[in-house]
Each structure stands twice: as C-alpha cells, then as structure tokens.
Image (tube, rainbow, N blue to C red):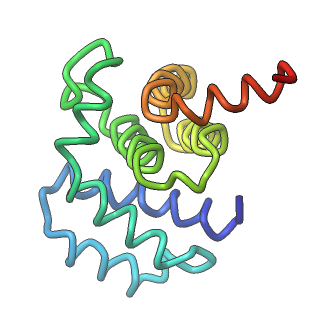
Amino acid sequence: MSQAKTNARKCAVQALYQWQMSGDSLTRIETYFLEEEHLKGAQKTYFSELFHGVPKQLDVIDAALAEFVDRPVEKIDPVERAILRIGAYELINRLETPYKVIINEGVNLAKDFGADGSHKYVNGILDKVAQKQRAVEIAAKQRHKSGD
C-alpha cells in the first residue's frame, strides 16, 4: 500500500475523530485539514473518500461493526471507533484492496493513535468484519494455499 494512502488514512482518523467529538460540519473540518496542510504527503482524494464515505454510510458501517463489538458502537473509545469505521468502510467498499492490508493499516493506526493494546481490539474486530464481508476472497485464498 502506498505511503500516500497510509497518510490519507491517518488524516481521516483525525478528521473523523474531530467530527465525532465536535459534531462540526464535514466541510468545515475538511477545509481546516486542507488549509493547515495536514494533508501534505497524503492522497487527498482518498482522504476525502474516507472522510465523506464513513458518515454517508454510517448506518451500514456501524451495523457491520455491531455484530462483533462487545458494546454499542457509540460507546467505543472515539479513536478506536474512527479507526474501526474506516476499516469497515474499506472492507465493504474497497474490494480491490486486500483485506489483510486493510486490517494491517487499522492495526498500525491503533498503534499510532490508540491506547495501549487497542491494536489487538481493532485487529480482532476488523478480522471478524473481514470474515463476513470478504468471505469469498478469504475462501479463495485458503483454496489457493491448500493447492485446490
């Protein structure tokens, strides 16, 4: 995965966190990120897709997460919630990106921004979401590994 996409995810986590905490408009938050050059080195179109795509599909994303989390999605730590929402969004919508890459990116985001040990929680939840959302991809990989 490109560093520019990784940087876009990092910015998207921060922007979604800000949106979740402040309730401010997406446009205002995005403008802030653009004006303050937070997106330097980031793929701006990918940032924008994630930042606008998560709120647009919030019901679908939160429903996908709700099956596997141990509490209501709204009660999850806001940083972890932003990371999980981005990961779920990508697992559902970005089928060209291998699920293992998406999970790995989520784990790294949790290591960068989350509390100690939160990467384990993020890994477990995104893995379960992937098992459901990417069942065909996972089954194909398993068949390929076993030589079928």
Q: Which residue is at a point 17% across and 42% down the rendered structure image?
A: 59
User: Quadrant of the rendered structure where residue 29 is?
Assistant: bottom left
Q: Which residue is at a point 66% across and 44% down the rendered structure image?
A: 101
Left or right, residue 73 beside residue 11: left
Residue that protrudes farthest toward the top in the picture: 70
Q: Which residue is at a point 20% across and 59% down the rendered structure image?
A: 56
Q: Is residue 5 above or below residue 45?
A: above
Q: Report the label total.
A: 0
Left or right, residue 38 beside residue 48: right
Left or right, residue 111 beside residue 63: right
Between 108 and 100, the one nearer to me in the picture: 100
Q: Is residue 60 above or below residue 66?
A: below
Q: Quadrant of the C terminus?
A: top right
Q: In the rendering, at what x and y percent does residue 19 appear?
A: 22, 57
Between 147 and 133, the one nearer to me in the picture: 147
Residue that protrudes farthest toward the bottom in the picture: 35
User: Quadrant of the rendered structure where residue 18 is?
Assistant: bottom left
Q: Is residue 59 above or below residue 32?
A: above
Q: In the rendering, at what x and y percent does residue 102 appear?
A: 58, 44
Q: Quadrant of the N terminus?
A: bottom right
Q: Which residue is at a point 40% across and 45% down the rendered structure image?
A: 92
Q: In the rendering, at what x and y percent does residue 61 appear?
A: 28, 41
Q: Is residue 64 above or below residue 1?
A: above
User: Quadrant of the rendered structure where residue 23 is?
Assistant: bottom left
Left or right, residue 25 beside residue 118: left
Q: In the rendering, at what x and y percent does residue 13 appear?
A: 42, 53
Between 9 and 14, the one nearer to me in the picture: 9
Between 135 and 22, the one nearer to me in the picture: 135
